[in-house]
Amino acid sequence: MVETRDPDCLFCKIAAGELNTPFLVETDDVVAFADIAPQAPTHVLVVPKRHISSASALNGDDAGLLSELVAVANQVAKEQGVDQSGYRILTNVGDDAGQTVHHLHLHVLGGRPLATLG
Ligand code: 5GP
Ligand code: ZN
């Protein structure tokens, strides 16, 4: 896998350990860390180390990475104790979805009933 990085990207810096953000999980390709402004008792971000701007930039070559992102999200849910009560995995793409950091990340939200979408 080609490693790419955007020097101006916040999550590239966090994933590289440059901001000393504590990681809840780290694998070769993925890190998970607490959201700075949690929207639920559990709010963790699962982020590829490689810079990918959003889910819309994923392609067939990224199937393994996507699977790993979801596996880490599930591991986080288990470690946070929300795997039985339920949790939401979501990713925002673009302005209307409210994407503010343009480096792919899965939100893992849980620990309280979450409003239904729609
Ligand atoms: P988005 O709105 O792009 O889907 O999600 C970006 C998320 O990143 C937000 O929930 C926001 O609170 C979180 N965030 C922004 N800056 C930082 C930061 O410096 N550290 C951490 N841990 N989270 C951040
Ligand atoms: Zn990045």
Image: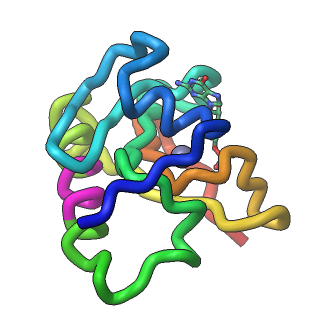
* Depth order, front residue of 3/12: 3
Left or right: 97 in relation to 8? right
Q: Quadrant of the N terminus?
A: bottom left
| Residue 106 visible (yes or no) | no
Where does residue 6 sit, x and y in percent of width and height?
A: 57, 46
Please state if 57 lies on the left or on the right of 61 as rendered: right
Residue 29 is covered by the magenta coloring: no
Task: Give the residue drawn at x 29%, y 23%.
Answer: 23
- In percent of the image, x 77 and y 55: which residue is there? 98
Most extreme residue toward the bottom, as rendered? 60
The part of the chain drawn in magenta is 68-73
Q: Tell me the chief SS of the magenta region.
A: helix
Q: Position of residue 118 (x, y in %)?
A: 72, 72
Residue 34 seen = yes
Q: How many marks?
A: 0
Using residue 103 as the reference point, say whether residue 65 is left or right of it.
left
Q: Is residue 99 above or below residue 47?
A: below
* Residue 66: percent from left, percent from top: 30, 68
Q: Residue 99: horizontal and vertical position, in percent?
A: 72, 54
Q: Write the residue at 57% across / 51% down.
A: 103
Q: Is residue 99 left or right of residue 74?
A: right
Furthest-top residue in this view: 20
Q: Is residue 70 magenta?
A: yes
Q: Which of these two is toward me, 8 or 69? A: 8
